[in-house]
Image (spheres, grey):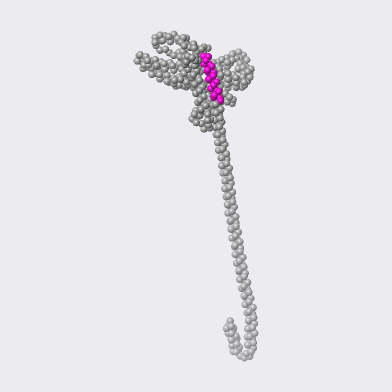
Amino acid sequence: MRAFVNLYAAGDGFVPPSTNDFNLPPLTESIPWLTKPVLLVFLSVILVSVFFILSARKAAVVPSKLQFAGESIYAFVRNDLARDVIGHEFMRFVPYLFTLFTFVLTNNIFGIVPFLQFPAMSHVAFPYVLALFSFGVFHYVGIRKKGLGSYLKEIAFMPGVPKPVYILLTPIEIATFFLVRPLTLSLRLFANMFAGHLLLLVFIMGGDYMLHDSHLIMKLFSPFSFAFGIALTFFEFMVQCLQAYIFTLLTALYIAGALADEH
Amino acid sequence: MRSINLLAGGEPLNPLIPHTAELIVGAIAFTLLFLVLRKAVVPKFEKAFTDRTEAIQGGLERAEKAQEEAQRALVQYNEQLSSAQGEASRLREEARVQGAAIIEELRTKAQEEAARITAAAHASIEAERQQAVTSLRNEVGALAVELASKIVGEALADQARQSRIVDRFIEDLEKSK
């Protein structure tokens, strides 16, 4: 990959976007940690807070348009994710799931918002943190519900399975609950955002490169690259919403599993 | 983990290794958002949902109550109507009976009156007849006595004379009548 890039760089050709395009320099040299994704994450906290506080402020029986908009998102997480998945104890987890969904969704959508145009979740630290929280939450509720011993026993020795199967099943189950779940949760989100942003970069930068190329044919093909970039933007929007939904849904499923009496 | 300062140029960095600063920022930002939403948003929306549910349920209950009341009123009106109809037919029947009784009574009275008048007439006729018989009897006696005295007084001479006396008597009778 690197050699490939260098080859073109040497010939003043097209330099395709690489993982280095995700390493944005700090906004000011004096505050090294204040990068664009950090700023975007804080911006998302402010935007989501302000939007929902304004929307929920009146809590009217007959909602205004703003309240209806906020309420619809909240009701979606509350009813379609929390209630339908977790069941009668769902209300305890609504604030967490609601925060998760809105936080991930907003930061994902930043990837296609003009001028922001960077999905914070393509920096793996943020999905890691969120997955760690979800990991903590679902294990915590499981331990609280069943006690540490019987919770771990239920994970390691799934009831209703012939004893020899445990040789195979126990390592798989332990790996699933303590390694695979948090890793897949975070990496799924990260990889989708990362790849999506990279794809957009390829087509937009490619279009730009072709437009400035001296050959006429290259210039003629440039709009196609841009058009495809725009089409991908719509596709990305879908992926961004979907990933926020999946992250929240899986967390709800894990919580439901930890709360369930038997497997 | 690596520091962000190391980014500029050089080897492409492994995107799977998180920045420490971003881990901290992500945790703080998420926690912040969680606290805000839990404190200021979720209870409000829940309250709106509860209020709405209550409003709808209250409306339904009110409507149900109103319907029940209307039903009750309808039953009551129907009862009143049927009782009024019963009352009316009862009154009509009573009036008919009373009318018949009155007619019957009047007829009886009239018959009695007629009978009474007839009886009175009969009585008065009888009395007059009685009176006439009495007076006639008296007069006939006197007349017979008068005639007999006349006949006796005339010396019963001849037949012609006798017959004249009788004729005269009868003439007198007729005249006096």
Q: Kindly tell me whether residue A242 is visible in this rendering.
A: no
* Span colored in magenta: B19-39
Quadrant assignment for the N terminus of chain A: top left
Quadrant assignment for the C terminus of chain A: top right
The residue at 57%/50% (across/down) is B85
Magenta region's main secondary structure?
A: helix
The residue at 58%/58% (across/down) is B99
In front of the other: B149 or A44: A44
The location of residue A162, given as percent across then percent down, is 62, 16
Give above or below for A138 relative to B110.
above
The residue at 57%/25% (across/down) is A91
Q: Is residue A109 left or right of residue B176?
A: left
Question: Magenta stretch: residue B32 in it?
Answer: yes
Q: Is residue A206 left or right of residue B31?
A: left
Q: Is residue B15 left or right of residue A172?
A: left
In front of the other: A146 or A22: A22
The location of residue B79, given as percent across then percent down, is 58, 46
Q: Residue furthest left?
A: A216
The location of residue B144, given as percent across then percent down, is 64, 84
